[in-house]
Amino acid sequence: MNYVITVLLTVISGVLVFIVKNLITMNQNLQKEKRTTSDAISAGVLALLKIQLIEYHDKYMLGNQIPTHVYENFDEMYKAYVALGGNGTIKRMKEDIDKLNVGKTA
């Protein structure tokens, strides 16, 4: 009788170890997928922010003035761009925008 119990416990523990190992592997795969998706979303948002920041820069540098609401939008987008890991090209554009006359109608 003890032998049967020992065999059953061995089999059950083996099955439990197998199940736990598979659950851990599945969880790691899901985390990796989630990171990949999150990285792709961040890269996409970064690209869209960069496009809009460049468009604002090109448009408003021509007149040496920028409406307040556009400046505020540029500033908020710039902060998000930097938080997502944006590069120095847009930093130079932000410095240009900061030198414009703010508040006048463009």
Image (tube, helix red, strand yellow):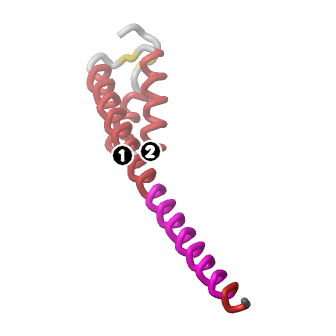
Q: Please state which amino acid type lies under the numbered disc 2.
A: Leu
Query: Was residue 18 drawn as part of the magenta stretch in this picture?
Result: yes
Question: What residue appears at the point 46 percent right and 13 percent down from the top-left corner?
Answer: 103
Q: Is residue 1 left or right of residue 13?
A: right
Q: Is residue 2 left or right of residue 70?
A: right
The residue lying furthest to the front in this view is 1
Q: Is residue 25 left or right of residue 4?
A: left
The residue lying furthest to the bottom in this view is 3
Task: From the top left corner, tell me how far across and down residue 45 is, in percent.
Answer: 38, 37
Question: What residue appears at the point 57 percent right and 75 percent down from the top-left corner?
Answer: 17
Question: What residue appears at the point 48 percent right and 43 percent down from the top-left corner?
Answer: 83
**Considering the numbered disc 1 on the image, is that residue within a helix, a strand or a loop?**
helix
Q: Which of 47 and 86 is in front in this view?
A: 47
Q: Residues within 10 Å of mark 2 (few under 14, many from 20)?
A: some
**To which residue does mark 1 refer?**
40
Question: What residue appears at the point 42 percent right and 26 percent down from the top-left corner?
Answer: 74
Task: From the top left corner, tell me how far across and down residue 76 is, in percent.
Answer: 48, 29
Q: Is residue 90 above or below residue 97?
A: below
Image quadrant containing the N terminus: bottom right
Task: From the top left corner, tell me how far across and down residue 47 is, in percent.
Answer: 32, 38
Q: Nearer the viewer, residue 27 or 15?
A: 15
Task: From the top left corner, tell me how far across and down residue 7 is, in percent.
Answer: 63, 86
Q: Please state which amino acid type lies under the numbered disc 1.
A: Ala
Q: Nearer the viewer, mark 1 or mark 2?
A: 1
Q: What stretch is highlighted in magenta?
A: 6-31
Q: In this view, does 43 lie to the left or right of 79?
A: left
Q: In this view, does 80 lie above or below 63?
A: below
**To which residue does mark 2 refer?**
84
Q: Earlier in the sequence, mark 1 or mark 2?
A: 1
Give how far apart the Cα atoms at labels 1 and 2 are: 12 Å
**Considering the numbered disc 2 on the image, is that residue within a helix, a strand or a loop?**
loop
